[in-house]
Image (cartoon, grey):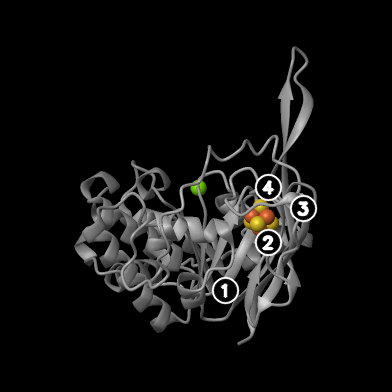
């Protein structure tokens, strides 16, 4: 399968400032050299605890946030090199769905206005054509055209997320970055929104990067899953591989902590010691070594390379390779 997007050695550093003159006193490596590919038509799940850099990665892919280093190759072009004007042309092809649709929908605008706006910005001048498209979008996500004149507060959380999805679809995107799109919803509603996203993917040839904080949510939507820890990708493989045959001790611990239906990988519960260290002051070597139950001497000294440990299965751990 062809890659739609290729990420190479992507990094994001945030300065830490302090003191009276607010001088830079350090750097947070929010994303610390990650590489991966998203194939056309697939869903790549990206999982990790809060602060691991998954949202930062998602935002960089759309250049809502400027990368510090690295390449983002979308349909063959490195988009980190594009000017804002050039970027605008491809913006429609890459869209984002947010965790909190309420925060991303203007409360003073009707749904029609919200859904029309991207069309206007991208030069659909004919009012009737826009209205037609708005009605079509509402139906596509399981709402009705009479919803068009209402305001965001008149909808439930699940309906608002459908509106967020409709907005993301308005410019016929190829890639959708969904940043915890169901985390704020009730479990029963989560399944509906996930099913909707799956149907839309089939009908409109969409490719997804689906960001979540636990492995349970991405299980049935992801073709492959990547796991991040403290700004680094620690494991990446076909979905079933990650759930049945995890290689990285962090993934193993995550899997042991949540019951997931039909997952055979059941070792005893692995309880990680301590909290996630501060990304401003990450541990040396393998940044997981302070909590890893399998850590040995080398782990505190040498950063493990992210490498293919079995066909199509990548992990960054000294126990492998
Ligand atoms: Fe654990 Fe060492 Fe592997 Fe890091 S490299 S995950 S500390 S065993
Ligand atoms: Mg986040």
Whole-percent x, y for residue 114 in the image:
39, 54
Whole-percent x, y for residue 39 in the image:
59, 79
Residue drawn 70% across the image and 41% down it: 283
Earlier-in-chain disc, 4 versus 1: 1
Furthest residue to the bottom?
A: 1
- Whole-number angstrom distance, CA of label 2 to CA of label 3: 10 Å
- Whole-number angstrom distance, CA of label 3 to CA of label 4: 12 Å
Quarter-of-image position of residue 212? bottom left
Mark 2 or 1: the one toward you: 2
Whole-percent x, y for residue 274 in the image:
53, 37
- Whole-number angstrom distance, CA of label 2 to CA of label 4: 10 Å
Can you tell which mark lies on residue 287? 4
Earlier-in-chain disc, 3 versus 4: 4
Earlier-in-chain disc, 3 versus 1: 1
Callout 3: SS: helix
Residue behind label 4 places its C-beta within 8 angstroms of ligand 1 = yes
Callout 4: 10 Å neighbours few (<14), some, many (20+)? many
Residue occupied by mark 3: 298
Assign ligand 1 to one image quadrant: bottom right
Earlier-in-chain disc, 2 versus 3: 3
Q: Are marks 3 and 4 in contact (CB under 8 Å)?
A: no
Residue drawn 48% across the image and 66% down it: 125
Residue occupied by mark 1: 237
Mark 3 or 4: the one toward you: 3
Residue behind label 2 places its C-beta within 8 angstroms of ligand 1 = yes
Q: Quadrant of the C terminus?
A: bottom right
- Whole-number angstrom distance, CA of label 2 to CA of label 1: 14 Å
Q: Is residue 63 visible?
A: no
Quarter-of-image position of residue 228? bottom right
Q: Are marks 3 and 1 in contact (CB under 8 Å)?
A: no
């Amino acid at each position: 399968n062809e890659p739609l997007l290729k990420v190479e050695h992507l990094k994001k550093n945030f300065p830490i400032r302090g003191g009276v003159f607010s001088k830079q006193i350090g750097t947070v490596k929010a994303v610390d050299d990650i590489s991966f590919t998203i194939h056309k038509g697939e869903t790549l799940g990206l999982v990790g605890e809060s602060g691991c850099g998954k949202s930062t990665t998602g935002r960089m892919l759309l250049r809502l946030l400027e990368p510090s280093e690295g390449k983002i190759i979308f349909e063959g072009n490195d988009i980190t090199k594009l000017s804002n004007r050039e970027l605008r042309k491809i913006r429609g092809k890459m869209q984002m769905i947010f965790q909190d649709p309420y925060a991303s929908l203007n409360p003073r605008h009707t749904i029609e206005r919200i859904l029309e706006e991207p069309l206007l910005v991208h030069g659909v001048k004919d009012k009737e054509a826009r209205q037609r498209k708005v009605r079509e979008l509402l139906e596509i996500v399981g709402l009705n055209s009479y919803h068009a004149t209402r305001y965001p507060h008149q909808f439930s959380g699940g309906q608002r997320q459908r509106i967020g999805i409709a907005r993301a679809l308005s410019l016929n995107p190829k890639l959708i970055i969904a940043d915890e799109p169901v985390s704020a919803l009730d479990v029963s509603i989560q399944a509906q929104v996930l099913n909707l996203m799956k149907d839309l993917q089939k009908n409109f040839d969409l490719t997804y990067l689906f960001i979540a904080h636990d492995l349970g949510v991405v299980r049935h939507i992801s073709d492959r899953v990547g796991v991040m820890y403290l700004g680094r990708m620690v494991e990446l493989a076909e979905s079933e591989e990650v759930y049945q045959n995890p290689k990285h001790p962090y993934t193993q611990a995550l899997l042991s902590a949540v019951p997931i239906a039909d997952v055979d990988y059941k070792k005893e519960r692995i309880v990680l010691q301590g909290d996630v260290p501060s990304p401003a002051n990450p541990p040396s070597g393998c940044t997981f070594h302070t909590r890893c139950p399998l850590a040995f001497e080398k782990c505190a000294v040498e950063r493990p390379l992210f490498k293919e440990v079995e066909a199509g299965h990548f992990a960054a751990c000294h126990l492998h390779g």
